[in-house]
Image: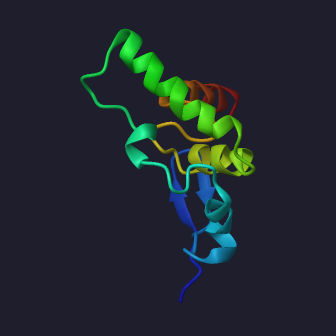
Amino acid sequence: MSRKKIVREGGVIPPVSPTLDTYGWMIRGACRGENSELFFLDDNLRGKDKSSKILAAKQVCFRCPVRQECLEYSIKARVPYGVWGGLDQEQRAEILKKMKEVS
């Protein structure tokens, strides 16, 4: 398999092989066994219902032994939806925006 580098906006990202070495941290995630819908918002949720769902997902993240790896992955991969590493999509978007301003 070729190990070409992929050029994306914001820099060069080496190709990622879907192996246990790369994604093994996911096996240890506190979210394993949880309903994945907990971590992704329904577009119709608003106000208190939206806040409650985000908080419930973050509570799982806050007890997670691989929270940092998850957050780093979601930012590096620019995951646009859901709660990853204890941050919701708006919080991660703000981090990406600041990273772009610095570069």
Q: Where in the figure is residue 91, as x and y percent of width and height?
A: 57, 25
The correct choice, above or below, for 17 with respect to 53 in the image is: below
- Residue in the image at 55% along x and 56% along y: 32
Tell me if residue 96 can be seen: no
Q: Where in the figure is residue 46, as x and y percent of width and height?
A: 32, 14
Query: Left or right: where does residue 40 sit relative to residue 61?
Result: left
User: Which of the 4 image quadrants contains residue 41?
Assistant: top left
User: Which of the 4 image quadrants contains residue 15?
Assistant: bottom right
The correct choice, above or below, for 84 with respect to 65 in the image is: above
Of residues 102 and 42, the one drawn nearer to the viewer in this rendering: 42
Q: Where in the figure is residue 71, as x and y percent of width and height?
A: 65, 43
Of residues 71 and 8, the one drawn nearer to the viewer in this rendering: 71
Tell me if residue 9 can be seen: yes
Question: What colouring does the structure picture have?
Answer: rainbow
Q: Residue furthest front?
A: 33
Query: Left or right: where does residue 89 sit relative to residue 50?
Result: right
**The C terminus, quarter of image:** top right
- Residue in the image at 46% along x and 19% along y: 52
